[in-house]
Amino acid sequence: MKKLTNTMDIRVSNAISILQMLRHQIPKTKSQIASDTGLSFSSASNIATILVDKGLLQIDENSLSTGGRKAACLSFYGNFAYSIVIDLHDLRTGYLGLVNMNSEIIKTISFEIKSNDTLDDILLKISKANDNLMRDVSTPIIGVCCAIAAVFLENSNIVLSCSNPVFEGLNIVSILQDLFHNDFVVVENDANLSILAQGNNDTTSTSKISIFLTQGVGMGIMIHNQLYKGKDGIAGELGHMKVRGDSRKCKCGHYGCLRLFVPLESIAYDLNEIELLENGLSNLEYAKQLAIRYNDNEVEVVQRIELAKQKLGEALAVLLDIFNPDEFIICGNMVELFPIFDNGVKDICRNNSKLAKPFDSKISFDTRTPSQLMQIGGSERLFTSWLQNGFESYISN
Ligand SMILES: [Zn+2]
C-alpha cells in the first residue's frame, strides 16, 4: 500500500475502507461505521456525507429505529456507475456485459467469433455490440475490463500465448482505450477472473483456488483474499501440469498434460466428436448431451468421463498438498457435467493426497456459465483497480 502523505490521502484511504466494508455488509449507521473502521465519529460522518453526495452511498429510508429515535443507516449504492466487461475467453463466442458496482449483471450482448476473423473484424464486432449494450443507458461508465485466455504481461500491456493468436504480441490496452474512448482499461487473464467472481468477503481471511475449465485448464489463486499472480503475472497455468499414465503429446510439445484429459474439447476429441463443436454446437449444449449419454450408460462416454474425473482428482490432490486452501472451486464450460464430477472427484483427490485426511479442503462446483463468471469477475477486478487509481479524482471533483 502506498505511503499516506497528506490529509487528502488519508481521507481517500478512509473513504475506501468505508466503501469496502459497506459493499459486502448490511447497512450501518454512522456510529457503527466509525466503530467498525476505527475512525472517530466526526471523520466517519464527514467522509460518509461526501460519499452520499457523490452517489456512492445511499441513506436507507427503512432504517430501523433505535431507542425510539431513527438512526439513519447507510448502504453502498451499486448503480452509481457501471463497468463494461469484454469477455474474449472463448474462441467462438464473445460477450460484452454491463455490470454494476455490486457486480450484478445488467445486460449482456454476445457475438460470434469466426476462426478466420482478423483483429479488425473482432474489434468491429465489439464496437457494434457496445452500441447495442449502451442503447438507452445513461449511467456513467467507470471503465472497461477485458477477459482474455492468455498470458498477459501487465508491465508492458502485451498479450502472449493467447488461445486466439490474433491478439498475440499486441498492446491490447491501448487498442481498447481507443475503441472505447476510455482511458480506464484493465485486461486480465480469464482464470484470474474466475476466482475474483467468487466474491471477496473482507470479514474473513480465506485462501481459495478456482479451476477454470475451458479450452484449457486455468487456475485462479486467492491467498488471504488477495489475487496471487506471481512475479511476472503469469501464475496459474495448470493445463500443462503432467499427470500419470498417458503418453499423448500436447501442443506444447510434451506428454501427459492435464489439458489432454479434463476439458470438454479433449473429451470431444477422444470421442471423435470435435466437429460437433467446430460446427457450432455450444460447449454448454455438448456438455449437456454428454451428461445424458453418461447417465444412459453409453460405455465410451462413461469411460472417457471417468478418465477426466480421475485426472482432475489427481491434479487437485497435488494442489491440496501444495496450497492447503480453504476451498477449491471447479468452474467453466462443462457445468452440466459437474454433478457427475461431484460424484467421485472429491474421493479421488482425498485418496491421492498425502494431507487430505488430516487437513482436507472443501471442493465445490460453480454452476454459473463462464460468461457470467467473466462479467462478475471482470467487474470486481475493475472496481478494485478503480479504488486504487480512479477513485481519488472521482471524489475530489
Ligand atoms: Zn502441454
Image: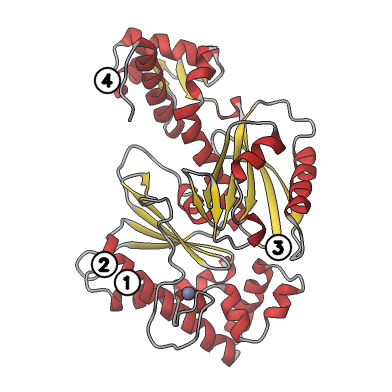
Cα–Cα gap, marks 2 and 4? 38 Å
Residue 203 vertical position relative to residue 340 in the rendered view, above or below: above
Q: Earlier in the sequence, mark 3 or mark 1?
A: 3
In this view of the protein, can residue 355 be seen by the observer? Answer: yes
Quarter of the rendering occupied by the C terminus: top right
Q: Please name the amino acid that badge 3 sits on.
A: Arg
Q: Which residue has dot 4 on it?
A: 38
Cα–Cα gap, marks 2 and 3? 36 Å
In this view of the protein, can residue 59 be seen by the observer? Answer: no
Residue 317 marker: 1
Residue 347 vertical position relative to residue 94 in the rendered view, above or below: below
Kindly report which numbered mark, 3 or 4, lies closer to the viewer in this rendering.
3
Residue 355 vertical position relative to residue 308 in the rendered view, above or below: above
In contact (CB < 8 Å): disc 4 and disc 1: no
Q: Which residue has dot 3 on it?
A: 92
Q: Secondary structure at mark 3?
A: loop
Q: Which residue has dot 2 on it?
A: 321
Q: Please name the amino acid that badge 2 sits on.
A: Asp
Q: Nearer the viewer, residue 381 or 361?
A: 381
